[in-house]
Image (cartoon, helix red, strand yellow):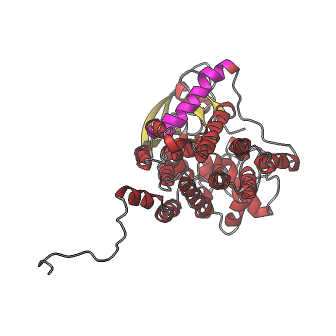
Amino acid sequence: MQAAGRIRYTGWMPPHPPRVATWKAAIARPGPPLALAVALAAGWVLFGLDAPLVEDSLFWWVPKGLLAAQGGPARVLAGALPDAMTAGLTPETTPPQWRGGLPDYAHPPLWYAWLGLFLGQSASVHAVHLACLLPAVVAAAGFVKLGERLGNPWAGLAVLCLPPVVAQAWRPELDLPLLAAVPWALVALVDGRWRSFALLSALAVWCKEPGVLLAAPAVWRAARERRLRWEALAPLAALGLWGLLHPEGLAKPERLPADLASWLTRDLPLAFRLALVEQGRWVLLLGAPLALWGKDRSLPHQLLAVFALTWVVFFSVVGFSTGRSPGFVLTHVRYFVPGIAVMVLLVGSRWPWLALPGLLWMHDRSPYGPEGSLWGIDVGRAEVAAAPWIEAAARQGVVWVGSYQAAGLTQPWAGRTPRPVLGFRVYSADTRPAALALGSTVLIADYGEPAGRLERGLSLEPVERWTVGEASVVAYTVAAVREVAAPVEVEGPGTPPR
Protein backbone atom coordinates (compact mmCIF):
# COMPACT_ATOMS: atom_id res chain seq x y z
CA MET A 1 0.00 0.00 0.00
CA GLN A 2 1.39 3.35 -1.04
CA ALA A 3 2.06 5.79 1.73
CA ALA A 4 -0.21 8.81 1.80
CA GLY A 5 1.26 11.94 0.21
CA ARG A 6 4.00 10.03 -1.61
CA ILE A 7 4.07 10.24 -5.41
CA ARG A 8 5.69 7.40 -7.30
CA TYR A 9 7.38 8.15 -10.64
CA THR A 10 6.07 5.62 -13.21
CA GLY A 11 6.92 7.26 -16.55
CA TRP A 12 9.89 8.77 -18.41
CA MET A 13 10.49 12.50 -18.34
CA PRO A 14 13.19 14.27 -20.34
CA PRO A 15 16.02 15.69 -18.26
CA HIS A 16 15.94 19.42 -17.66
CA PRO A 17 18.50 21.10 -19.93
CA PRO A 18 21.47 22.67 -18.18
CA ARG A 19 20.93 26.34 -17.38
CA VAL A 20 24.16 27.33 -19.14
CA ALA A 21 23.17 25.55 -22.34
CA THR A 22 19.73 27.18 -22.28
CA TRP A 23 21.28 30.62 -21.78
CA LYS A 24 23.74 30.13 -24.62
CA ALA A 25 21.00 28.89 -26.92
CA ALA A 26 18.91 31.97 -26.14
CA ILE A 27 21.84 34.26 -26.86
CA ALA A 28 22.49 32.55 -30.19
CA ARG A 29 18.93 33.07 -31.46
CA PRO A 30 19.19 35.62 -34.30
CA GLY A 31 15.55 36.74 -34.41
CA PRO A 32 15.31 39.25 -31.52
CA PRO A 33 18.63 41.07 -32.11
CA LEU A 34 17.96 41.25 -35.86
CA ALA A 35 14.51 42.76 -35.36
CA LEU A 36 15.86 45.19 -32.76
CA ALA A 37 18.77 46.28 -34.97
CA VAL A 38 16.48 46.92 -37.95
CA ALA A 39 14.02 48.85 -35.78
CA LEU A 40 16.78 50.97 -34.21
CA ALA A 41 18.40 51.80 -37.56
CA ALA A 42 15.11 52.67 -39.25
CA GLY A 43 13.87 54.66 -36.27
CA TRP A 44 17.13 56.61 -36.04
CA VAL A 45 17.09 57.62 -39.71
CA LEU A 46 13.43 58.64 -39.56
CA PHE A 47 14.06 60.57 -36.33
CA GLY A 48 16.74 62.59 -38.15
CA LEU A 49 14.81 63.44 -41.31
CA ASP A 50 15.45 67.14 -40.63
CA ALA A 51 19.14 66.76 -39.73
CA PRO A 52 21.07 69.39 -41.74
CA LEU A 53 23.53 68.25 -44.37
CA VAL A 54 27.16 68.98 -43.58
CA GLU A 55 30.66 68.83 -45.04
CA ASP A 56 31.22 66.62 -48.08
CA SER A 57 27.59 65.57 -48.46
CA LEU A 58 26.62 69.26 -48.55
CA PHE A 59 29.33 70.35 -50.96
CA TRP A 60 29.76 67.36 -53.27
CA TRP A 61 27.71 64.17 -52.90
CA VAL A 62 24.15 65.52 -52.70
CA PRO A 63 24.88 68.08 -55.48
CA LYS A 64 25.98 65.16 -57.65
CA GLY A 65 22.71 63.45 -56.75
CA LEU A 66 20.87 66.58 -57.87
CA LEU A 67 22.82 66.44 -61.14
CA ALA A 68 21.77 62.80 -61.58
CA ALA A 69 18.15 63.75 -60.86
CA GLN A 70 18.33 66.51 -63.48
CA GLY A 71 20.09 64.71 -66.32
CA GLY A 72 19.91 61.04 -65.41
CA PRO A 73 22.65 58.66 -64.19
CA ALA A 74 26.05 58.98 -65.83
CA ARG A 75 29.56 57.65 -65.34
CA VAL A 76 30.80 61.16 -64.61
CA LEU A 77 28.67 63.67 -62.73
CA ALA A 78 30.66 66.90 -62.77
CA GLY A 79 30.75 70.34 -64.36
CA ALA A 80 28.10 73.04 -64.13
CA LEU A 81 25.99 73.20 -60.98
CA PRO A 82 22.49 71.71 -61.27
CA ASP A 83 19.56 74.08 -61.67
CA ALA A 84 18.28 73.24 -58.18
CA MET A 85 21.43 74.86 -56.78
CA THR A 86 21.91 77.90 -58.99
CA ALA A 87 18.42 79.20 -58.17
CA GLY A 88 19.58 80.19 -54.68
CA LEU A 89 23.01 81.58 -55.56
CA THR A 90 24.24 85.07 -56.42
CA PRO A 91 27.83 86.05 -57.24
CA GLU A 92 28.22 87.41 -53.70
CA THR A 93 26.78 84.37 -51.88
CA THR A 94 28.42 81.61 -53.97
CA PRO A 95 30.99 79.72 -51.85
CA PRO A 96 34.41 79.54 -53.51
CA GLN A 97 34.17 75.74 -53.60
CA TRP A 98 31.31 75.99 -56.13
CA ARG A 99 32.61 78.75 -58.36
CA GLY A 100 34.25 76.25 -60.68
CA GLY A 101 31.29 73.87 -60.73
CA LEU A 102 31.32 70.32 -59.37
CA PRO A 103 34.68 68.53 -59.65
CA ASP A 104 35.04 64.90 -60.66
CA TYR A 105 36.52 62.93 -57.77
CA ALA A 106 36.49 59.71 -59.85
CA HIS A 107 34.26 57.79 -57.44
CA PRO A 108 31.79 55.23 -58.84
CA PRO A 109 28.36 56.77 -59.56
CA LEU A 110 26.04 54.24 -57.91
CA TRP A 111 25.37 56.33 -54.81
CA TYR A 112 24.75 59.49 -56.82
CA ALA A 113 22.23 57.63 -58.98
CA TRP A 114 20.49 56.31 -55.85
CA LEU A 115 20.27 59.81 -54.37
CA GLY A 116 18.97 61.07 -57.72
CA LEU A 117 15.99 58.70 -57.53
CA PHE A 118 14.82 60.43 -54.35
CA LEU A 119 15.88 63.98 -55.22
CA GLY A 120 14.02 63.70 -58.51
CA GLN A 121 10.82 63.41 -56.49
CA SER A 122 11.65 66.19 -54.03
CA ALA A 123 14.82 68.26 -53.75
CA SER A 124 14.66 68.37 -49.95
CA VAL A 125 16.61 67.28 -46.92
CA HIS A 126 13.83 64.79 -46.12
CA ALA A 127 14.30 63.08 -49.49
CA VAL A 128 18.04 62.83 -48.90
CA HIS A 129 17.60 61.12 -45.54
CA LEU A 130 14.95 58.77 -46.89
CA ALA A 131 17.57 57.64 -49.40
CA CYS A 132 19.74 56.71 -46.40
CA LEU A 133 17.02 54.54 -44.83
CA LEU A 134 17.63 51.34 -46.80
CA PRO A 135 21.45 51.29 -46.54
CA ALA A 136 21.27 52.06 -42.81
CA VAL A 137 18.85 49.17 -42.20
CA VAL A 138 20.87 46.82 -44.42
CA ALA A 139 24.07 47.71 -42.55
CA ALA A 140 22.49 47.10 -39.13
CA ALA A 141 21.07 43.74 -40.22
CA GLY A 142 24.38 42.76 -41.80
CA PHE A 143 26.37 43.27 -38.62
CA VAL A 144 23.85 41.20 -36.64
CA LYS A 145 24.16 38.36 -39.16
CA LEU A 146 27.93 38.69 -38.99
CA GLY A 147 27.75 38.49 -35.20
CA GLU A 148 25.66 35.35 -35.59
CA ARG A 149 28.58 33.77 -37.47
CA LEU A 150 30.72 34.53 -34.41
CA GLY A 151 28.22 32.78 -32.16
CA ASN A 152 26.51 35.88 -30.74
CA PRO A 153 24.16 37.94 -32.96
CA TRP A 154 23.80 40.48 -30.14
CA ALA A 155 27.37 41.54 -30.94
CA GLY A 156 25.95 43.24 -34.02
CA LEU A 157 24.12 45.67 -31.75
CA ALA A 158 27.44 46.68 -30.22
CA VAL A 159 28.30 48.32 -33.56
CA LEU A 160 25.24 50.57 -33.17
CA CYS A 161 26.76 52.01 -29.99
CA LEU A 162 29.67 53.55 -31.90
CA PRO A 163 29.26 57.34 -32.30
CA PRO A 164 30.75 57.46 -35.84
CA VAL A 165 28.42 54.66 -36.98
CA VAL A 166 25.38 56.43 -35.52
CA ALA A 167 26.48 59.72 -37.10
CA GLN A 168 27.06 58.04 -40.47
CA ALA A 169 23.36 57.13 -40.71
CA TRP A 170 22.60 60.87 -40.92
CA ARG A 171 25.39 61.58 -43.41
CA PRO A 172 24.45 60.79 -47.04
CA GLU A 173 28.04 60.06 -48.05
CA LEU A 174 29.48 57.24 -50.13
CA ASP A 175 30.68 55.60 -46.92
CA LEU A 176 27.11 54.70 -45.90
CA PRO A 177 26.34 52.27 -48.77
CA LEU A 178 29.86 50.89 -48.37
CA LEU A 179 29.09 50.22 -44.70
CA ALA A 180 25.95 48.37 -45.83
CA ALA A 181 27.72 46.16 -48.36
CA VAL A 182 30.79 45.20 -46.30
CA PRO A 183 29.15 43.04 -43.57
CA TRP A 184 27.08 41.05 -46.08
CA ALA A 185 30.17 40.37 -48.20
CA LEU A 186 31.96 39.15 -45.06
CA VAL A 187 28.96 36.95 -44.14
CA ALA A 188 29.16 35.31 -47.55
CA LEU A 189 32.92 34.82 -47.14
CA VAL A 190 32.57 33.26 -43.69
CA ASP A 191 29.88 30.92 -45.02
CA GLY A 192 32.09 29.90 -47.93
CA ARG A 193 29.56 31.16 -50.51
CA TRP A 194 32.19 32.35 -52.91
CA ARG A 195 29.98 33.50 -55.76
CA SER A 196 27.84 35.56 -53.38
CA PHE A 197 31.03 37.03 -51.98
CA ALA A 198 32.20 37.96 -55.47
CA LEU A 199 28.96 39.80 -56.25
CA LEU A 200 28.70 41.56 -52.88
CA SER A 201 32.35 42.60 -52.77
CA ALA A 202 32.09 43.99 -56.31
CA LEU A 203 29.01 45.94 -55.20
CA ALA A 204 31.00 47.30 -52.24
CA VAL A 205 33.74 48.50 -54.60
CA TRP A 206 31.19 50.19 -56.84
CA CYS A 207 29.75 51.95 -53.81
CA LYS A 208 33.22 53.22 -52.92
CA GLU A 209 36.66 52.03 -53.93
CA PRO A 210 37.97 50.92 -50.47
CA GLY A 211 35.66 47.92 -50.80
CA VAL A 212 38.63 46.42 -52.64
CA LEU A 213 40.14 45.66 -49.21
CA LEU A 214 37.66 42.78 -48.93
CA ALA A 215 40.16 40.91 -51.09
CA ALA A 216 42.49 40.57 -48.09
CA PRO A 217 40.34 38.18 -45.99
CA ALA A 218 39.23 36.39 -49.17
CA VAL A 219 42.82 35.65 -50.15
CA TRP A 220 43.47 34.55 -46.56
CA ARG A 221 40.63 32.01 -46.72
CA ALA A 222 41.67 30.78 -50.16
CA ALA A 223 45.20 30.26 -48.84
CA ARG A 224 43.83 28.33 -45.85
CA GLU A 225 41.86 26.10 -48.23
CA ARG A 226 44.90 25.74 -50.50
CA ARG A 227 42.72 26.35 -53.52
CA LEU A 228 42.76 28.89 -56.32
CA ARG A 229 39.65 31.01 -55.97
CA TRP A 230 38.99 33.53 -58.70
CA GLU A 231 36.21 34.94 -56.53
CA ALA A 232 38.81 36.08 -54.00
CA LEU A 233 40.05 38.59 -56.58
CA ALA A 234 36.58 39.86 -57.52
CA PRO A 235 37.08 43.14 -55.58
CA LEU A 236 40.26 43.83 -57.52
CA ALA A 237 38.53 43.00 -60.81
CA ALA A 238 35.65 45.37 -59.94
CA LEU A 239 38.10 48.16 -59.15
CA GLY A 240 40.00 47.55 -62.37
CA LEU A 241 36.78 47.62 -64.38
CA TRP A 242 35.80 50.97 -62.89
CA GLY A 243 39.28 52.31 -63.69
CA LEU A 244 38.76 51.31 -67.33
CA LEU A 245 35.26 52.80 -67.56
CA HIS A 246 36.13 56.13 -65.94
CA PRO A 247 37.79 58.55 -68.37
CA GLU A 248 40.36 59.75 -65.84
CA GLY A 249 41.08 56.39 -64.23
CA LEU A 250 40.91 55.81 -60.48
CA ALA A 251 40.67 58.37 -57.70
CA LYS A 252 43.99 59.63 -56.43
CA PRO A 253 44.87 59.36 -52.72
CA GLU A 254 44.16 62.51 -50.76
CA ARG A 255 47.38 62.32 -48.77
CA LEU A 256 50.37 60.03 -48.42
CA PRO A 257 52.95 59.88 -45.60
CA ALA A 258 55.97 62.10 -45.97
CA ASP A 259 58.29 59.11 -45.50
CA LEU A 260 58.40 55.62 -44.00
CA ALA A 261 59.80 56.79 -40.67
CA SER A 262 57.03 59.32 -40.07
CA TRP A 263 54.42 56.71 -40.99
CA LEU A 264 55.82 54.12 -38.58
CA THR A 265 56.38 56.51 -35.70
CA ARG A 266 53.38 58.84 -36.05
CA ASP A 267 50.67 58.00 -38.60
CA LEU A 268 50.35 54.27 -37.90
CA PRO A 269 50.25 54.55 -34.08
CA LEU A 270 47.78 57.44 -34.30
CA ALA A 271 45.55 55.47 -36.68
CA PHE A 272 45.34 52.58 -34.22
CA ARG A 273 44.81 54.99 -31.36
CA LEU A 274 41.90 56.52 -33.30
CA ALA A 275 40.41 53.07 -33.95
CA LEU A 276 41.01 51.47 -30.54
CA VAL A 277 40.60 54.39 -28.15
CA GLU A 278 39.20 57.55 -29.70
CA GLN A 279 36.40 55.89 -31.67
CA GLY A 280 36.11 52.27 -30.53
CA ARG A 281 36.53 53.64 -26.99
CA TRP A 282 37.89 51.25 -24.44
CA VAL A 283 35.51 48.49 -25.50
CA LEU A 284 38.30 47.35 -27.78
CA LEU A 285 40.91 47.45 -25.03
CA LEU A 286 38.72 45.59 -22.51
CA GLY A 287 37.40 43.11 -25.02
CA ALA A 288 40.62 42.39 -26.90
CA PRO A 289 41.88 39.74 -24.42
CA LEU A 290 38.53 37.94 -24.72
CA ALA A 291 38.95 37.75 -28.48
CA LEU A 292 42.17 35.75 -27.99
CA TRP A 293 40.62 32.96 -25.95
CA GLY A 294 39.66 29.50 -27.17
CA LYS A 295 37.21 29.44 -30.06
CA ASP A 296 37.83 33.11 -30.78
CA ARG A 297 40.73 31.94 -32.92
CA SER A 298 38.38 30.11 -35.29
CA LEU A 299 38.31 30.83 -39.02
CA PRO A 300 35.50 33.44 -38.86
CA HIS A 301 37.42 35.37 -36.22
CA GLN A 302 40.59 35.16 -38.28
CA LEU A 303 38.87 36.45 -41.42
CA LEU A 304 37.36 39.42 -39.61
CA ALA A 305 40.63 40.19 -37.85
CA VAL A 306 42.48 40.21 -41.19
CA PHE A 307 39.86 42.55 -42.64
CA ALA A 308 39.90 44.98 -39.69
CA LEU A 309 43.69 45.18 -39.49
CA THR A 310 44.02 45.61 -43.25
CA TRP A 311 41.47 48.40 -43.18
CA VAL A 312 43.12 50.42 -40.42
CA VAL A 313 46.65 49.97 -41.81
CA PHE A 314 45.50 50.98 -45.31
CA PHE A 315 43.92 54.20 -44.10
CA SER A 316 46.91 55.03 -41.95
CA VAL A 317 48.66 55.41 -45.32
CA VAL A 318 46.00 56.69 -47.73
CA GLY A 319 44.00 59.71 -46.63
CA PHE A 320 45.32 59.94 -43.06
CA SER A 321 46.64 63.34 -42.05
CA THR A 322 48.43 64.32 -38.87
CA GLY A 323 48.74 67.90 -40.03
CA ARG A 324 51.68 70.23 -40.24
CA SER A 325 52.21 70.68 -36.54
CA PRO A 326 52.52 68.18 -33.65
CA GLY A 327 49.29 69.36 -32.04
CA PHE A 328 47.15 69.13 -35.16
CA VAL A 329 45.43 65.92 -36.20
CA LEU A 330 42.76 65.73 -38.85
CA THR A 331 41.40 62.82 -40.84
CA HIS A 332 38.14 61.59 -42.23
CA VAL A 333 36.97 59.35 -39.39
CA ARG A 334 34.31 57.87 -41.65
CA TYR A 335 37.06 56.21 -43.70
CA PHE A 336 37.88 54.02 -40.71
CA VAL A 337 34.30 53.09 -39.75
CA PRO A 338 34.01 49.66 -41.46
CA GLY A 339 37.27 48.51 -39.87
CA ILE A 340 36.34 49.89 -36.44
CA ALA A 341 32.89 48.28 -36.66
CA VAL A 342 34.35 44.85 -37.39
CA MET A 343 36.84 45.28 -34.53
CA VAL A 344 34.01 46.02 -32.11
CA LEU A 345 32.09 43.05 -33.45
CA LEU A 346 35.06 40.78 -32.78
CA VAL A 347 35.75 41.87 -29.25
CA GLY A 348 32.06 42.19 -28.42
CA SER A 349 31.22 38.64 -29.47
CA ARG A 350 31.40 37.58 -25.81
CA TRP A 351 30.23 40.69 -23.98
CA PRO A 352 28.41 43.06 -26.38
CA TRP A 353 27.44 45.36 -23.51
CA LEU A 354 31.05 46.54 -23.36
CA ALA A 355 30.16 48.88 -26.24
CA LEU A 356 27.38 50.67 -24.34
CA PRO A 357 29.66 53.40 -22.87
CA GLY A 358 30.21 54.62 -26.44
CA LEU A 359 26.79 56.24 -26.23
CA LEU A 360 28.19 58.67 -23.67
CA TRP A 361 30.36 60.25 -26.39
CA MET A 362 27.58 60.60 -28.95
CA HIS A 363 27.90 64.41 -29.10
CA ASP A 364 31.56 64.60 -28.15
CA ARG A 365 33.77 67.19 -29.83
CA SER A 366 36.30 64.95 -31.56
CA PRO A 367 39.92 66.08 -32.03
CA TYR A 368 39.88 64.26 -35.40
CA GLY A 369 37.19 66.40 -37.01
CA PRO A 370 33.39 66.39 -37.10
CA GLU A 371 32.74 62.83 -38.30
CA GLY A 372 33.63 61.01 -35.08
CA SER A 373 30.29 61.82 -33.44
CA LEU A 374 27.16 63.92 -33.91
CA TRP A 375 29.21 67.04 -33.18
CA GLY A 376 29.48 68.00 -36.86
CA ILE A 377 25.72 67.71 -37.29
CA ASP A 378 25.24 69.68 -34.06
CA VAL A 379 27.21 72.50 -35.69
CA GLY A 380 24.72 72.33 -38.55
CA ARG A 381 21.83 72.50 -36.08
CA ALA A 382 23.39 75.58 -34.49
CA GLU A 383 23.54 77.12 -37.97
CA VAL A 384 19.83 76.33 -38.39
CA ALA A 385 19.11 78.29 -35.20
CA ALA A 386 21.25 81.21 -36.43
CA ALA A 387 19.72 81.41 -39.92
CA PRO A 388 16.76 83.75 -39.09
CA TRP A 389 19.05 86.13 -37.21
CA ILE A 390 21.50 86.19 -40.14
CA GLU A 391 18.70 86.91 -42.61
CA ALA A 392 17.46 89.82 -40.50
CA ALA A 393 20.96 91.20 -39.86
CA ALA A 394 21.84 91.08 -43.59
CA ARG A 395 18.94 93.46 -44.32
CA GLN A 396 20.35 96.03 -41.88
CA GLY A 397 24.10 95.87 -42.46
CA VAL A 398 27.09 93.91 -43.75
CA VAL A 399 27.22 90.27 -42.60
CA TRP A 400 30.08 87.87 -43.36
CA VAL A 401 29.71 84.09 -43.07
CA GLY A 402 32.12 81.24 -43.82
CA SER A 403 31.78 79.21 -47.00
CA TYR A 404 30.36 76.15 -45.18
CA GLN A 405 27.60 78.21 -43.59
CA ALA A 406 27.02 80.07 -46.86
CA ALA A 407 26.43 76.79 -48.71
CA GLY A 408 23.73 75.80 -46.24
CA LEU A 409 22.06 79.22 -46.22
CA THR A 410 21.70 79.33 -50.02
CA GLN A 411 20.34 75.79 -50.50
CA PRO A 412 16.96 74.90 -48.95
CA TRP A 413 17.64 71.19 -49.53
CA ALA A 414 20.53 71.47 -47.05
CA GLY A 415 18.05 71.64 -44.18
CA ARG A 416 18.91 75.04 -42.69
CA THR A 417 16.32 77.41 -44.13
CA PRO A 418 13.11 77.00 -46.14
CA ARG A 419 14.27 79.59 -48.70
CA PRO A 420 17.64 80.94 -49.85
CA VAL A 421 19.09 83.65 -47.63
CA LEU A 422 20.52 86.57 -49.61
CA GLY A 423 22.51 89.70 -48.92
CA PHE A 424 25.47 88.33 -46.94
CA ARG A 425 29.12 88.09 -47.96
CA VAL A 426 31.32 84.99 -47.91
CA TYR A 427 34.78 84.79 -46.36
CA SER A 428 37.28 82.03 -46.97
CA ALA A 429 40.75 81.09 -45.77
CA ASP A 430 42.15 83.67 -48.21
CA THR A 431 40.02 86.63 -47.03
CA ARG A 432 42.15 89.50 -45.72
CA PRO A 433 41.09 91.04 -42.37
CA ALA A 434 41.21 94.50 -43.95
CA ALA A 435 38.35 93.49 -46.27
CA LEU A 436 35.96 93.58 -43.28
CA ALA A 437 34.83 97.11 -42.41
CA LEU A 438 34.44 98.34 -38.85
CA GLY A 439 30.99 97.59 -37.48
CA SER A 440 30.33 94.73 -39.85
CA THR A 441 29.20 91.37 -38.50
CA VAL A 442 31.12 88.12 -38.92
CA LEU A 443 29.85 84.67 -37.96
CA ILE A 444 32.26 81.95 -36.92
CA ALA A 445 31.16 78.35 -36.45
CA ASP A 446 33.03 75.72 -34.46
CA TYR A 447 33.65 73.82 -37.65
CA GLY A 448 33.89 74.99 -41.23
CA GLU A 449 35.94 77.55 -43.06
CA PRO A 450 39.20 78.30 -41.19
CA ALA A 451 38.75 81.69 -39.57
CA GLY A 452 42.13 81.89 -37.87
CA ARG A 453 43.38 84.67 -40.13
CA LEU A 454 40.35 86.84 -39.35
CA GLU A 455 40.55 86.11 -35.61
CA ARG A 456 44.21 87.14 -35.56
CA GLY A 457 43.75 90.24 -37.68
CA LEU A 458 40.54 91.61 -36.17
CA SER A 459 39.35 92.73 -32.77
CA LEU A 460 35.99 90.96 -32.42
CA GLU A 461 33.23 91.52 -29.88
CA PRO A 462 30.60 88.77 -29.48
CA VAL A 463 26.98 89.83 -29.89
CA GLU A 464 25.07 86.54 -30.19
CA ARG A 465 25.67 82.81 -29.70
CA TRP A 466 23.74 79.68 -30.72
CA THR A 467 24.69 76.40 -29.03
CA VAL A 468 23.64 72.81 -29.64
CA GLY A 469 25.40 70.22 -27.48
CA GLU A 470 29.10 71.05 -27.62
CA ALA A 471 28.75 72.92 -30.93
CA SER A 472 28.21 76.64 -31.33
CA VAL A 473 27.97 79.47 -33.84
CA VAL A 474 28.95 82.96 -32.65
CA ALA A 475 28.16 86.34 -34.23
CA TYR A 476 30.82 89.03 -33.70
CA THR A 477 31.05 92.74 -34.46
CA VAL A 478 34.32 93.99 -35.94
CA ALA A 479 35.63 96.50 -33.39
CA ALA A 480 39.08 97.12 -34.88
CA VAL A 481 41.43 95.92 -37.60
CA ARG A 482 44.96 95.08 -36.51
CA GLU A 483 47.90 95.19 -38.89
CA VAL A 484 49.39 91.68 -38.88
CA ALA A 485 51.51 89.73 -41.28
CA ALA A 486 49.52 87.15 -43.23
CA PRO A 487 50.50 83.75 -41.80
CA VAL A 488 50.38 80.50 -43.70
CA GLU A 489 46.95 78.98 -43.03
CA VAL A 490 47.24 75.44 -41.69
CA GLU A 491 45.25 72.96 -43.69
CA GLY A 492 42.10 72.37 -41.69
CA PRO A 493 38.51 71.24 -41.79
CA GLY A 494 37.45 73.93 -44.22
CA THR A 495 39.78 72.63 -46.93
CA PRO A 496 37.68 70.92 -49.62
CA PRO A 497 38.58 67.27 -50.29
CA ARG A 498 40.79 66.34 -53.19
**Is 86 a magenta residue?**
no
Judge whether residue 274 is colored magenta. yes
Q: Is residue 359 visible?
A: no
| Rendered position, 472 above or below 147 | above
Quadrant of the snapshot with the N terminus: bottom left
Q: Which of 345 and 68 is in front in this view?
A: 345
Determine whether 151 is above or below 312 in the image: below
Q: Position of residue 450 (x, y in %)?
A: 59, 33
Tell me: 288 left or right of 197: left
Residue 485 coordinates in the image, percent (x, y):
61, 18
- Image position, residue 137 (x, y; %): 57, 61
Left or right: residue 384 versus residue 200 is left
Q: Residue furthest bottom?
A: 1
Asked if residue 461 shows in the view, the reply is yes
Snapshot quadrant of residue 490: top right
The answer to which quarter of the image holds residue 461 is: top left
What secondary structure prevails in the magenta region? Answer: helix
**373 displayed left or right of 193:** left
Q: Residue furthest front?
A: 1
Residue at x 68%, y 43% (from the top left corner)? 217
Work out whether residue 480 or residue 468 is closer to the camera in this orientation and state it.
468
Residue beneath the point at 53% across and 23% down: 327
Q: In the figure, residue 369 lies in which quadrant?
A: top right
Q: Where is residue 286 in the image (x, y as percent from the top left)?
A: 43, 37
Magenta segment boundaries in residue numbering: 261-284
Q: Which of 208 and 171 is in front in this view?
A: 208
Q: Quadrant of the C terminus?
A: top right
- For the image, the number of numbered tags is 0
**Residue 333 drawn above or below residue 481:** below
